């Protein structure tokens, strides 16, 4: 029976202790989830198991025999395969060529295409997939590409599969398919290590959860012990304050933001109308491609729009982000690295970018006032950075996201538009941002946010607008919100009056 | 210098220094080294006459580098600088001498034309989204061609008159026995204004922001199109100022070769001085030293007998390449230190 062990492994990078004496093991027929905040040491541990890093201390053993992993290749020869978060496949090659890449069967020095395709077909069949091995990889969906990557590992007789956040870019159906495949592999005796931020997946899949914190083992939970609160407490190191929704929150009657027959260029014939009051949080749900991001961008004036957008009852023409900002609308874009931040710029520069005219006279920046405003926002959002002058690219994802949020808040907006406000950040930071958003609404801000996570919609939204092919198909109150209804509406399989 | 990129500070250093500062220090060391070597190789280098002459040349090219830097920090490029120098350098004597226009009017007209040229570049780049390289490459051909048509390929100059006007470029002030040329003071003034705008104003901070990430800047409400367009206007106007100073200094412009390759001197000076071509980085002090370094090198090639005059471009090319390599090395070393690997 397969058993991969790590005993007392430690690893330092420069002055930073990434792993500090961690014991870990996984057996054949078992799926072990690994959890922890960003920087807890998950990736380092996985990279040591996959032969990418060598530990400074401690040792590894396979089936009770000590092994030295000098490279990814030597890990592969021991039957260990890492499936990366960013898929490492070549779009221009066929499925079979990808499966066999680096390990092509040869005849007289030439690639034996028939055997190559046969190997791929067998590996794909084990996953229950009927993909023609000669299909160019570029024609497959992301979900299928992930399967091809797993097939590639299986073709190399992998006994230990390590998956690093495999569902981060999968649709729900694709993720479900992946879970079935993993169940099947587990039943066949494969050892699986599964890294994820998503608690629902962990509950669904894991036989055991290993939680890391600050490079050490924080604890292990068996399948029946997996509960959100226990997991979070282990990850963060302190119990979370219970979140009680304040449904009696006082709200103004007047609409802070209203849309009348707004349509975007991606769905020109579909229109959206809604209005939200001060202090209200509206979630926007829908499938990828339903036009959620496009709607946000159109409201904020990045993309052209038809229809009327009113802020505090006053119609604002579509004249770009600056005009919307003046009207009191701030926006947090979906992709913080490319749309939200100047990665090389300092935390201070990023925070103050939008509202710079607020701290200037005759065009000259009052740098002291600027610094004070940034410092108070760093304090308020608990942004962890050494100094405000440090480049924002050095911060963790959660802290980077707080900087983008802080930049929006420093504009002192009346309406906050958030596109996937907690995408790709760890659980602790996510909770903090949620708490902050609720607090802002309590202070009278109107918040509109797009989210692909049911958990987030349910935790934040007073109402949820469901978009399907550009149209608003339903407006659900918080009490009407449940996952199946939402999915049916978003997929267009259920119509609501 | 808070708007300088600081992605390379040593985490435990007592005196953290930004990458921008390091680049300036690097170019200053290279500059002093070249000066010292030239002084050793030629006894004509450190004469008062030669230094005054170098200051004048550096000041004229410094104005062009300053202009180039405005566009480079936005992530753009202006290849038409040399042709704008040619057009403005030919137009000024042509207007004043051949057309008998009053001097202030002629200067204003030349500046207005340059502003129009810059605005056209800016709108084509910012509004239509054309590549700055292509837009200004067409400009490079267009404005020299226009200059040749206007003055009919004839050499234009001020002859023996207009000494007061020419004095702007040719006069000098005595500072401790050194005749410091007037254009040098003009450059200091323009540089100071640029420095203040870049470092202290909303305009400057936003300009650097859009150079780093135009999308993020636009989403943050920065009026990116207007800023990009203004930077091309400023660049073209500074090129025109340079062009007028050049023609006042040498008292003659032949449109077929006046200002040839000047855009490359301007860009090279700015890049050597720490303006990254990808945008968002630049230091006024650095680019001034960079522009001066180019002139000292040309001077050295003339003065030092061991260096053949024919090799001027080859030597300049090698030095710029060397500067870029050192810059890259500095960047990598600081990055390695910062990540602690």
Image (cartoon, rainbow, N blue to C red):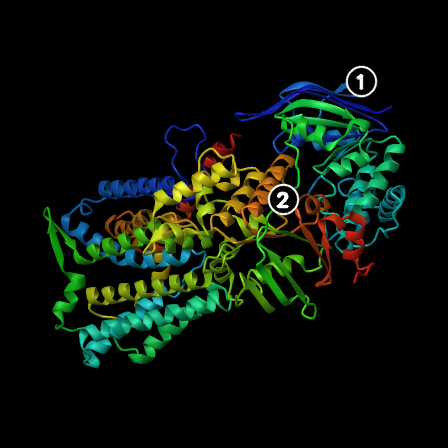
Residue in the image at 69% along x and 47% along y: A457
In this rendering, position of residue A122 left or right of residue B28 = right
In this rendering, position of residue A290 left or right of residue A382 = right
- How far across and down, in percent of the image, does residue A7 sit? 71, 18
Instruction: Say whether residue A322 is visible.
Output: yes
Vertical position of residue A494 compared to residue A271: above or below: above
The residue under label 1 is: A64
Q: Residues within 10 Å of mark 2 (few under 14, many from 20)?
A: many
In this rendering, position of residue A344 left or right of residue B37 = right
Disc with the residue nearer the chain's start (2 vs 1): 1
Q: Nearer the viewer, residue A40 or B71?
A: A40
| Quarter occupied by the C terminus of chain A | bottom right
The residue under label 2 is: A422
Q: Nearer the viewer, residue A172 or B56?
A: A172
- How far across and down, in percent of the image, does residue A262 sit? 63, 67
Residue in the image at 44% along x and 53% along y: B277
Residue in the image at 64% along x and 49% along y: A420
Q: Chain of mark 2?
A: A
Q: Secondary structure at mark 2?
A: loop
């Amino acid at each position: 029976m397969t058993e991969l062990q790590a005993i007392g492994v430690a690893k330092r990078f420069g002055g930073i202790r990434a792993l500090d004496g961690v014991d870990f093991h996984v057996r054949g027929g078992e799926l072990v989830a690994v959890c922890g905040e960003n920087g807890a040491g998950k990736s380092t541990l996985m990279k040591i198991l996959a032969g990418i890093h060598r530990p400074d201390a401690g040792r590894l053993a396979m089936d009770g025999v000590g092994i030295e992993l000098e490279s990814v290749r030597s890990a592969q020869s021991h039957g260990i395969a890492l499936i990366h978060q960013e898929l490492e496949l070549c779009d221009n090659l066929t499925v079979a060529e990808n499966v066999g890449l680096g390990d092509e069967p040869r005849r007289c020095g030439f690639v034996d295409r028939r055997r190559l395709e046969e190997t791929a077909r067998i590996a794909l069949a084990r996953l229950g997939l009927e993909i023609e091995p000669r299909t160019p990889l570029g024609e497959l969906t992301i979900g299928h590409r992930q399967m091809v990557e797993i097939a590639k590992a299986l073709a190399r007789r992998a006994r230990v599969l390590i998956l690093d956040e495999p569902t981060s870019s999968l649709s729900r159906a694709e993720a479900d398919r992946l879970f079935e495949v993993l169940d099947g592999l587990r039943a066949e005796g494969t050892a699986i290590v599964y890294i994820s931020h998503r608690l629902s997946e962990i509950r669904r899949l894991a036989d055991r959860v290993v939680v890391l914190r600050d490079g050490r083992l924080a604890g292990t939970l068996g399948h029946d012990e997996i509960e959100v609160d226990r997991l979070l407490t282990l990850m963060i190191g302190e119990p979370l304050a219970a979140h009680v929704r304040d449904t009696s929150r006082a709200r103004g009657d007047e609409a802070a933001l209203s849309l009348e027959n707004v349509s975007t260029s991606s769905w020109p014939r579909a229109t959206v109308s809604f209005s939200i009051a001060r202090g209200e949080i509206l979630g926007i749900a829908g499938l990828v491609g339903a036009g959620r991001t496009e709607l946000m961008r159109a409201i904020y004036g990045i993309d052209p729009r038809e229809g009327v957008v009113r802020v505090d009852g006053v119609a604002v023409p579509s004249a770009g982000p600056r005009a919307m900002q003046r009207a009191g609308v701030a926006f947090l874009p979906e992709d913080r690295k490319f749309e939200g931040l100047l990665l090389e710029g300092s935390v201070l520069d990023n925070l103050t970018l939008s509202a710079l005219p607020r701290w200037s006279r005759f065009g000259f920046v009052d740098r002291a006032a600027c610094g004070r405003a940034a410092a108070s926002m760093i304090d308020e959002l608990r942004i962890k950075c050494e100094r405000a002058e440090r480049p924002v690219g050095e911060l963790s994802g959660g802290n980077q996201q707080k900087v983008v949020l802080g930049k929006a808040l420093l504009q002192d907006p009346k309406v906050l538009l958030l596109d996937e406000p907690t995408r790709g950040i760890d659980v602790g930071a996510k909770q903090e941002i949620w708490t902050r958003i609720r607090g802002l609404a309590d202070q009278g801000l109107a918040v509109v946010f797009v989210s692909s996570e049911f958990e987030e919609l349910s935790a934040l939204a007073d109402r949820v607008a469901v978009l399907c092919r550009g149209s608003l198909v339903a407006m659900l109150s918080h009490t009407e919100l449940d996952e199946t209804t939402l999915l049916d509406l978003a997929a267009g399989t259920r119509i609501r009056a | 210098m808070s708007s300088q990129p600081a992605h390379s500070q040593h985490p435990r250093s007592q005196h953290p220094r930004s990458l921008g500062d390091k680049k300036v220090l690097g170019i200053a060391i290279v500059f002093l080294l070249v000066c010292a070597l030239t002084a050793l190789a030629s006894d004509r280098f450190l004469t008062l006459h030669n230094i005054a002459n170098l200051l004048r040349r550096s000041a004229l090219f410094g104005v062009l580098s300053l202009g180039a830097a405005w566009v480079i920090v936005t992530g753009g490029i202006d290849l038409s600088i040399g042709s704008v120098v040619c057009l403005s350098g030919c137009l000024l004597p042509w207007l004043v001498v051949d057309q008998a226009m009053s001097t202030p009017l002629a200067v204003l007209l030349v500046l207005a034309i340059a502003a129009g040229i810059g605005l056209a570049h800016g709108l084509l780049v910012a509004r239509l989204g054309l590549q700055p390289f292509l837009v200004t490459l067409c400009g490079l051909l267009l404005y020299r061609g226009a200059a040749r048509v206007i003055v009919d390929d004839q050499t234009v100059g001020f002859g023996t008159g207009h000494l007061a006007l020419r004095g702007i470029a040719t006069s000098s002030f005595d500072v401790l026995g050194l005749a410091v040329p007037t254009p040098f003071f003009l450059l200091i003034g323009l540089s100071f204004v640029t420095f203040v705008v870049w470092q202290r104003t909303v305009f400057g901070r936003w300009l650097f922001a859009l150079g780093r990430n135009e999308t993020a800047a636009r989403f943050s409400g920065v009026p990116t199109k207007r800023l990009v367009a203004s930077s091309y206007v400023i660049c073209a106007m500074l090129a025109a100022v340079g062009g007028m100073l050049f023609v006042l200094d040498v008292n003659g412009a032949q449109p077929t070769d006046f200002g040839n390759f000047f855009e490359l001197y301007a860009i090279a000076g700015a890049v050597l001085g720490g303006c990254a071509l990808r945008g968002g980085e630049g230091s006024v002090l650095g680019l001034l030293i960079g522009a001066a370094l180019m002139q000292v090198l040309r001077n050295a090639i003339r003065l030092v007998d061991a260096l053949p005059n024919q090799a001027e471009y080859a030597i300049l090319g090698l030095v710029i390449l060397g500067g870029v390599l050192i810059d890259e090395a500095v960047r990598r070393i600081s990055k390695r230190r910062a990540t602690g690997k």
